[in-house]
Amino acid sequence: MCSRGKYCAKTVKEKVAILREVDERKASKVEIAKKHGMPPSTLSTYVRNRKAIEDAYEAEDFASNKKKAPISQVSGNCDRCGHVVKEMRSTDILLSGPIIMAKVADFALRMNVEDFVASEGWFHRFRDRHNLVFRVLSGEAKEVDAETCATWRSGALQQYLESYSAQDIFNADETALFYKLQPDRTVTFKRDSCAGGKRSKERITVLVAANMTGTEKVPLFVVG
């Protein structure tokens, strides 16, 4: 029982009932908010987050009479949040800190944690807990799917390998050499500012090739 004048957190079931009152349009939002002892801004939050509230209400693993969960409950479910990150990466979705924070904030809302804030500090702890790192994407790494590679390796490639000796099989690839590009890190004092100029984009293209045994390396072929 909430004391007089103090807002009492609503259960998901109560929130859904309040949203239905809004849909019926028998009273204004201000009147509905006053009736349930909440500020109009809270009711606006319910309306804005309607889908998450209704999804939580329908979820089989959610007790409809559950009050607001403590923030520690969300922290205790970090494994589930980590699973969400794995699922998103498996579909090649590019993730950033704000995207992950938004997903976990949605999860917190489904758990009826109204005052949870996915802050930068929280994200850094979450990142360390799950060993998450930022990496540069390799542009060509996913040009060919794994199944196609496996089929080619077990079929056509084996036929080619049987037709030639290892020393006569070469592999070639091109790469870019930014010959004027300086390192982006330096050693300096903590109190000193560290700013560099515009980074050079001058480059040449280099073709490198060598045979399978490593006994013969083709001279570099440079373009640029």
Image: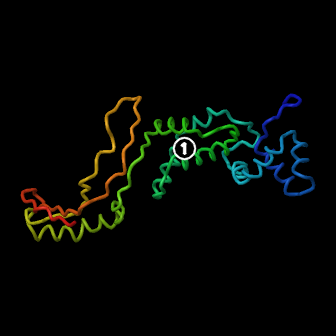
Q: Quadrant of residue 157?
A: bottom left
Q: Is residue 155 above or below residue 36?
A: below
Residue 59 screen position, x and y as percent:
68, 49
In this view of the protein, which residue sits in the foreground, 50 or 13?
Answer: 50
Q: Quadrant of residue 178?
A: bottom left
Q: Is residue 120 above or below residue 156?
A: above
Specify few, some or many for label 1: CA neighbours under 10 Å numbering under 14, 14-19, or 20 or more. some
Residue 138 screen position, x and y as percent:
35, 57
Q: Secondary structure at mark 1?
A: helix
Q: Is residue 81 above or below residue 187?
A: below
Q: Residue at x 64, y 34 (%)?
A: 71
In this view of the protein, which residue sits in the foreground, 146 or 171?
Answer: 171
Q: Is residue 168 above or below residue 118?
A: below
State left or right for residue 114 relative to residue 5: left
Q: Quadrant of residue 144?
A: bottom left
Q: Farthest residue toward the front? A: 197
State left or right for residue 150 relative to residue 30: left
Residue 224 screen position, x and y as percent:
22, 66
Q: Residue at x 83, y 41 (%)?
A: 39
Q: Which residue is mark 1?
A: 81
Give the amino acid at mark 1: Cys
Q: Dividing the image into 4 quarters, which one contains the N terminus?
A: top right
In this view of the protein, which residue sits in the foreground, 55 or 170?
Answer: 170
Q: Residue at x 93, y 55 (%)?
A: 26
State left or right for residue 218 relative to residue 72: left
Q: Which colouring convention does the figure follow?
A: rainbow
Q: How many marks?
A: 1
In this view of the protein, which residue sits in the foreground, 174 or 205?
Answer: 205
Residue 195 screen position, x and y as percent:
39, 41
Q: Residue at x 34, y 52 (%)?
A: 199
